[in-house]
Amino acid sequence: MIGLKKRDIKKALKTGAKAGGSSYADVRADIESMIDKAMNSTDPEVQANYKRYFGNKRPTPEEYIYTITKKIKF
């Protein structure tokens, strides 16, 4: 992920959506649903991880993917 920029996420999501036969809007909606599930989770570990990365802010799908990919150690 060296050199990854936020604008690269949008381009990757558009490319992935097209390759998967979906629209960019559908992919964004799926990610927004995942964000909602994390924000509203009753699992204390999920809540702690979410707050560690995003605080009380609701990220855009692009911000979410960007932040998660930067934080995960491969």
Image: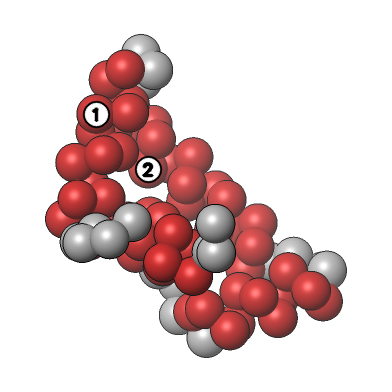
x, y percentage for residue 26? 38, 31
Tell me which residue sits at (32%, 28%) in the image.
16
Image quarter (top left, top right, bottom left or bottom right) of the N terminus: bottom left
Q: How many marks?
A: 2
Disc 2 secondary structure class = helix
Q: Mark 1 points at which residue?
A: 15
Given residues 74 and 6, the one toward you in this image is: 74
Tell me which residue sits at (49%, 70%) in the image.
71
Q: Eyeballing the image, is 13 above or below 6? A: above
Check disc 1: other Cα within 10 Å, few if <14, some if 14-19, many if 20+: some
x, y percentage for residue 22? 36, 20
Given residues 73 and 38, the one toward you in this image is: 73
Q: Eyeballing the image, is 14 above or below 57? A: above
- Tell me the CA gap for discs 1 and 2: 13 Å
Q: Tags 1 and 2 in contact by the CB under 8 Å rule? A: no
Q: Mark 2 points at which residue?
A: 28
Looking at the rendered image, the disc whose residue lies closer to the viewer, 1 or 2, is 1
Q: Quadrant of residue 52?
A: bottom right
Given residues 13 and 29, the one toward you in this image is: 13
Image quarter (top left, top right, bottom left or bottom right) of the C terminus: bottom right
Q: Quadrant of residue 65?
A: bottom left
Q: Eyeballing the image, is 58 above or below 15? A: below
Amino acid type, mark 2:
Arg
Give left or right: position of 46 versus 2.
right
Question: Which numbered disc, 1 or 2, marks the residue that appears first in the sequence?
Answer: 1
Give left or right: position of 33 versus 69.
right
Tell me which residue sits at (31%, 17%) in the image.
19
Is residue 60 something that shows in the picture? Answer: no
